[in-house]
Amino acid sequence: MEIKLLCYLIPSLVMFCCGVYGFLTRKNMIAMLISLELMLNAVDINFAVINRYLFPGSLEGMFFTLFAIAIAAAETALAIAIIINLYRVTKNVNVKDVNKLKG
């Protein structure tokens, strides 16, 4: 029995919407980064699933997914390094306190 396309796309949509909501409502940079990663994972699921259903014999969607995971890992490492440096200066990681560095 083959699983329908919507059985993959609906959880991906829920993940993406949760990521957008978390990114827009959180004040903590770590929580915003986690929400961003949730959105990127939802996009990766869509790459793989849509490739599987449109072109069952090819692996382009899988390669795009692997490339997106590698880019997300590099982006996360860079963001965590920035957050750690901001924490050293301001002693917290709230977005509103970043404006204190403009002085």
Image (tube, rainbow, N blue to C red):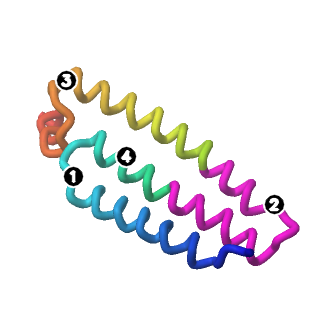
Quadrant assignment, res 80: top left
Q: Earlier in the sequence, mark 4 or mark 1?
A: 1
Q: CA distance from mark 1 to mark 3?
A: 21 Å
- Would residue 96 appear left or right of 58 to someone viewing this image? left
Residue carrying label 4: 34
Point out which mark residue 59 bears.
Answer: 2
- Would residue 58 appear left or right of 98 to someone viewing this image? right
Q: Are marks 4 and 2 in contact (CB under 8 Å)?
A: no
- Would residue 92 appear left or right of 8 to someone viewing this image? left
- Badge nearest the viewer, 2 or 3: 2
- Badge nearest the viewer, 4 or 3: 4
Please say whether residue 58 is one of the residues in the magenta stretch.
yes
- Mark 2 secondary-structure assignment: loop
Would you call the spot at circle 1 few (<14 residues within 10 Å), some (14-19), or many (20 or more)? some
Locate residue 6, reporting x and y percent.
Answer: 57, 78
Locate residue 88, reporting x and y percent.
Answer: 23, 21
Q: CA distance from mark 4 to mark 3?
A: 22 Å
- Secondary structure mostly seen in magenta is helix
Q: In this picture, is 100 found above or below 12?
A: above
Q: CA distance from mark 2 to mark 3?
A: 46 Å
**Residue at the front extreme, as displayed:** 1
Q: Which is nearer the eye, 59 or 95? A: 59
Magenta-colored span: 41-68
Residue carrying label 1: 26
Q: CA distance from mark 2 to mark 1?
A: 36 Å
Point out which mark residue 68 bears.
Answer: none
